[in-house]
Image: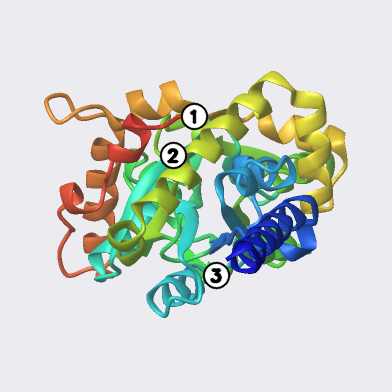
Amino acid sequence: MRKKVLALLLLAAAAVLAVTGCASNPAAQPKTEKTEKKVIIGYTPWTGYGALFIAKEKGYFKSRGLDVELQSIEGVGDRKQSLVANRIQAMAASLDVSVSAAGEGVPMKFVWAFDSSNGADGLIVKQGRGIENVADLKGKEIAFHRGSASHFFLSTILEKAGLTDSDIKAVDMKASEAASAFMAGKVDAAVTWEPHLSKAVAAGDRVLSTTKDTPGLIADVLAVREELVQKDPQAVQALVDALAEATDYLNKNPEDANKILAAAFKMKSEDVAADVKTVKFYDLAGNLEFYGTKEKPGTIFEVGKRAGAFYVNQKILSQAPDLTKFIDGSFINKAKK
């Protein structure tokens, strides 16, 4: 009997030693790895999307369990196709471009607004070619990216001057290429953005009109695949929360933010500083105002409606999309910085 009791005591002691051994030896304990949700966001090179790079550099995405990859895709059509094919799970794009994608049947939700252009986009014209005002653009060659925010802006200012797209000679190319063609003297005018506008002025040409003349017209949003919103709303909320924190940092720490963006876009910090002066960054409060409420919709609906009409008029869309199916303010309403 004593032998049996002794054996039981020895077994119990061995069990205790095994447990305490595991506790003191981390290698012996079972490993629980924290997995991060992979999200690829497509964007076009533009300082207005600065919150994306701040959030990545400062670890705001990572701290919320996200592994975010930022992928430069300048072409509007390329970004749309990548989103449809799930090669990217979200895209940073102008509101009007996002509305056109929605009208083409791309399943997505607009969950965050980055900024609105306040002079950052504009029309540059060559000196000595008889262009003193917008009405003088009639019959002139203008380089711009068809079906983009640049086109939306151009059509708006042409309409104000009593002209239409058919009154000009359109040269379709991406914004950066349009700026290069303009600087080389191949076209009379071009629609592009900073820093190309400032470079044109430095070269002796002039800026005829900017988005200061069309407040709120060009805004940028984050459009997320509807599938991600439905299957993993926590990941989408984490994206929005991180962008809210990043925008706060960007607004409160401009010098450091400009250094981060300068590295991201291969620019000088002073050039970034000049760029962001022409942009209004939407923080969380700005987003809530821009989106509005069900009872009192914000400017996003007004501009989105105008964009839908523009793309229908351009025969890019057969009909304007129902914006209530794509504009989703639920995440900004729950956002935590």
Distance from disc 1 to disc 3, alpha carbons, whole Å, reads 24 Å
Q: Assign a secondary structure to mark 1.
A: loop
Q: Estimate the x, y position of residue 179 in percent, counting from the top left.
A: 69, 58
Can you say whether 313 is above or below 64 in the image?
below
Q: How crowded is mark 1: few (under 14 residues within 10 Å), some or many (20 or more)?
A: many
Q: Which residue is drawn at 74% across and 56% down?
A: 17
**Pointers 1 and 2 in contact (C-beta within 8 Å):** yes
**Disc 1: which residue:** 282
Q: Which of 209 and 130 is in front in this view?
A: 209
Kindly tell me whether residue 195 is visible in this rendering. yes
| Badge 1 or badge 3: first in the primary sequence | 3
User: Residue 72 lies in what quarter of the image?
Assistant: bottom right
Q: Residues within 10 Å of mark 3 (few under 14, many from 20)?
A: some
User: Residue 328 lies in what quarter of the image?
Assistant: top left
Q: Residues within 10 Å of mark 2 (few under 14, many from 20)?
A: many
Can you say whether 53 is above or below 115 in the image?
below
**Disc 2: which residue:** 113
Q: Estimate the x, y position of residue 134 in percent, counting from the top left.
A: 48, 42
Q: Assign a secondary structure to mark 3.
A: loop
Identity, as a three-letter code, of the amino acid under mark 2: Ala
Identity, as a three-letter code, of the amino acid under mark 1: Tyr
Q: Estimate the x, y position of residue 133 in percent, counting from the top left.
A: 52, 38
Indicate which disc residue 180 carries. none
Distance from disc 1 to disc 2, alpha carbons, whole Å, reads 6 Å
**Disc 3: which residue:** 75
